[in-house]
Image: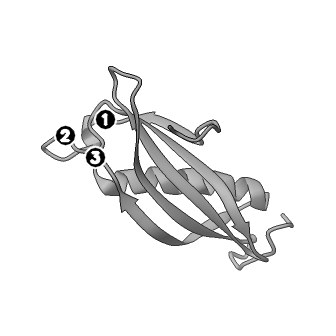
Amino acid sequence: MPPSIEPTIRVTTMPADANAYGDIFGGWLMGQMDMAAGLVAARRARGRAVTVAMDGMQFHAPVAVGDEVSVYARLSRVGRTSMVIDVEAWRRDRHGEDHERVTQAAFTFVAVGEDKKPRPVDTA
């Protein structure tokens, strides 16, 4: 079962996001996950936050054109300037209610100020 929280992002996959066999590109999926993690990081930092690392990306199942992809992002750790966000992506085909986790990873973000230098997470 998918997480019991609301998804951070939900999107339907399109042909432009797929290879010739109709499988969604891993890079497209990673981009959706990065966007979801970025939303969580910016909200917690109360300002700009940038991706500095991604760890443990695992693909569990393919995603096809037309599938609905829900991305769930949760803040798991906060440091002085950095945050780790755990992200999972789940698919549901367009004809059913079956959910399947397709990938997961941990994204690290750093809060940055207007000078683009790291700043404490707790200040904007």
Q: Nearer the viewer, mark 3 or mark 1?
A: 3
Question: Which disc number belongs to residue 14?
Answer: 1
Residue drawn at (31%, 35%), measured in percent from left and top? 14
Observer-side mark, 3 or 2, equals 3
Say which residue label 2 marks: 22
Residue 124 picture location, percent across and down: 84, 63
| Three-letter residue code for mark 3 | Pro
What is the three-letter code of the residue carrying label 2? Gly
- Where 13 falls versus 75 (above or below)? above
Q: Residue at x 58, y 39 (%)?
A: 7
Please name the residue that numbered disc 3 is placed on: 62
- Front of the two marks 2 and 1: 2
Q: Which mark is residue 2?
A: none
- Mark 2: secondary structure: loop
Sort mark 3 into few (<14), some (14-19) or many (20+) by Cα contacts within 10 Å: some
* Circle nearer the N terminus (3, 2): 2
